[in-house]
Image (tube, helix red, strand yellow):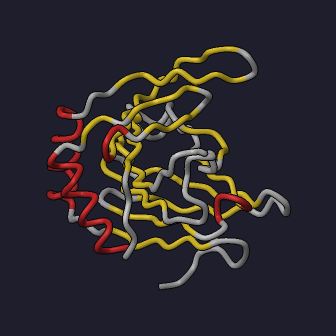
Amino acid sequence: MKNLLHTDGEVYYYGVVWDEDTAQRYFDILLKEIEWKQDVVKLYGKEWVTQRKTAWYGDNGIAYTYGKVNRVALEWTHTLLRLKEATEKITGSSYNSCLLNLYHHGNEGMGWHSDDEPEMKANASIASLSLGAARRFDFRHRITGETISMMLEQGSLLEMKGSTQRYWKHQIPKTAKVLEPRINLTFRTVVPVK
């Protein structure tokens, strides 16, 4: 499989790994069974409530700080465990947690960021599974400013690993063209901060 980054990291796009019917079935199940909440993020001393909804699941109540807010993982659902195990088989990596995002339409997105919080295992694989509406996904190199864009389709899988989070930021840009919802699952490995 070809690395989509020519320098400073590894990104692999596996394409569609679940057919349309299977992906839609998982989307419908997760929409109902996940404990979705609007995210509260602290930036520059202010609290912001995001439009998109999120959820954090993982092994034995793993804690994770995002946007200066501490979250404790909910217990895996049967569906999430099935998706985690299938993702592990495809990527050859293991994960102990999953951050889910629910974008109701294209006017909800995620700005430039890296998944480089202290709790994240350094250089470990982060696998991103997309269900629902196809959305554009961008990378931008921190030093050169180079950008790489791709479409994440319904049922597709993207993997980031190595030094990607150190040298590249990524985003889901907002767009008025997308009217349908999307669920994104990012399987991760979190370690306790000492």
Total labels drawn: 0
Does residue 130 appear to the left or right of 189 in the view shown?
Answer: left
- Residue 180 appears anywhere in the view: no
Identify the residue at the far front of this view: 194
**Residue at 42% of width from left, 22% of height from top?**
38
Work out whether residue 46 or residue 29 is closer to the camera in this orientation and state it.
Answer: 46
Find residue 162 and report its horizontal and vertical position in percent: 61, 70
* Residue at the far right in the pictured view: 143
Q: Going by the image, does 141 lie left or right of 79?
A: right
The residue under the point 28% across, 73% down is 89
Q: Is residue 144 visible?
A: yes
The picture places residue 194, in percent across and down from the top left corner, at: 60, 45
Give the farthest residue toward the bottom.
1
Q: Quadrant of residue 90?
A: bottom left
In the rendered image, which quarter is residue 138 located in? Answer: bottom right
Residue closer to the observer: 165 or 26: 165
The one nearer the camera, 46 or 16, is 46
Residue displayed at 59% across by 17% down: 48
Could you say which quadrant of the image residue 60 lies in? top left
Q: Position of residue 81 (x, y in %)?
A: 22, 53
Identify the residue shown where x is 53% and y is 65%. Answer: 124
